[in-house]
Image: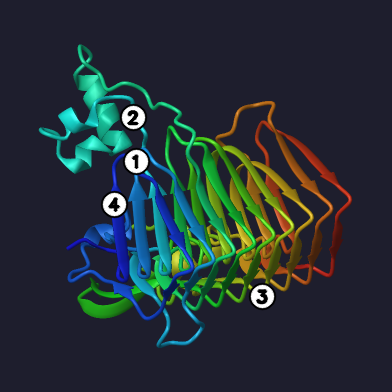
Amino acid sequence: YRAAGGGLSVSTFGGSITLKGSTFLGNRAEDLEIPASRYTSGGSSTGGGASLITFFGGITIEDSIFGDGTEAGSNVADDGGGGLYAMMGPALEWDWQKEALYKPPSELFDPLAIERSNQTNEAEPFPPAKAIGNKLIVKNSHFNGNVAGYGGGAVLVGHYGHQGVELSDSSFKNNVAGYQWQAEDQGELVDIQHSNGAAGLELVVKSGEALVTNSVFEYNITKELRSPPRNRTVQPTEGGALRITSEQPVTVSNNRFAYNEVVCPDDMFFGRCEWYASGGGALIRGIATFTENEVVHNSAPISGGVHIIGAGTPPGSKISVTRNRIQYNEGITGGGITIIAPHQDTEISGNYIADNTSSQAQ
């Protein structure tokens, strides 16, 4: 039931991919059947406009358009990346041509499967990832009015062995994260819509640094219409415009985050959305440098403007928030910016933080 790349699908093991000056309108990657596993692990239809996947090469996207802001021009993915799904898979140091002869793809390039294989086959474990110097680069490209379960505008993934992800001079506007399907809830067939990632850009970086700069994120919405059946669990709803998950340093600079939302219904998460749904403008997990950004008129139950979480990063690393304008954001717990740094140093300087609202639910 997998459908990757409604408009364009490119996959390569050893080559790089370059996409320039292209336009993607009205494409769709959809599941013929929505499995129950989507409640927890996501589905399998990615890249409504385009799906670009390489393991040992880099990816460059320049001067391209994904969606035009109209319903007819919207690119849709039932799972991740309404406009674009781009992934540099794990660059592993072994003879993949030989291994591919007897290893199914699900084991050949799945880090968890490789780890399990190493544990059960200590005599001949898979070698570690090898840094090969490639990057995933997106510049001067625009994502407008796309829809997906997560990463409504785009999903960018830089796996182990690569040198990170860079986004610059681009825009994400009017994108939506939230897919809808039917399921039985206490004997009743109901429509359910769930999102577990950002409406604008979902960015995952396993090695190398992440950079998001000189870009605009406006009017993106991550939403829940109704909670899933009571015997299912789901991931939190996070990041109205941007969600970054990184094991390496993250720099977010000179961007505009405006009028983005995370929306959650009253019956979601036992009626306590303020525990789970966060980051109206952006949610960042990693060693973050957040500087010279404009964050205005965003909203979410937790931290209407920005939510930065240092969990999982090395003790002694530093989170830096400097020279930002953070204004007119709204949240139930945390209006402007929320920083959680369990073991990290935190520098906050030169910011203008004004007119934000936190209205703690009783």
Q: Amino acid at mark 1?
A: Phe
Q: Residues within 10 Å of mark 3 (few under 14, many from 20)?
A: many
Q: Is residue 94 above or below residue 151?
A: above
Picture coordinates of residue 156 (x, y %)?
46, 53
Tell me the element at label 1.
loop
Q: Let me know if residue 229 appears in the view.
A: no
Mark identifier at residue 92: 2
Residue 43 horizontal side relative to residue 146, left or right: left
Q: Which residue is mark 3?
A: 259
Q: Residues at badges 3 and 1 in contact (C-beta under 8 Å)?
A: no
Residue 142 horizontal side relative to residue 81, left or right: right
Instruction: Measure the alpha-carbon separation of dots 4 and 3.
Output: 36 Å
User: Looking at the image, which residue is at 81% across and 57% down?
Assistant: 324
Residue 124 horizontal side relative to residue 12, left or right: left
Instruction: Measure the alpha-carbon separation of dots 3 and 1.
Output: 36 Å
Q: Which residue is mark 1?
A: 55
Tell me the element at label 3.
loop
Q: Let me know if residue 3 appears in the view.
A: yes
Picture coordinates of residue 356 (x, y %)?
79, 68
Q: Nearer the viewer, mark 4 or mark 3?
A: 4
Q: Is residue 265 above or below residue 61?
A: below
Q: Amino acid at mark 3?
A: Tyr
Picture coordinates of residue 224 (x, y %)?
45, 72
Q: Which residue is mark 4?
A: 11
Q: Residues within 10 Å of mark 4 (few under 14, many from 20)?
A: some
Instruction: Measure the alpha-carbon separation of dots 4 and 2.
Output: 17 Å
Which is nearer the N-term, disc 1 or disc 2?
1
User: Looking at the image, which residue is at 27% across and 22% down?
Assistant: 126
**Depth order, front residue of 195/15:** 15
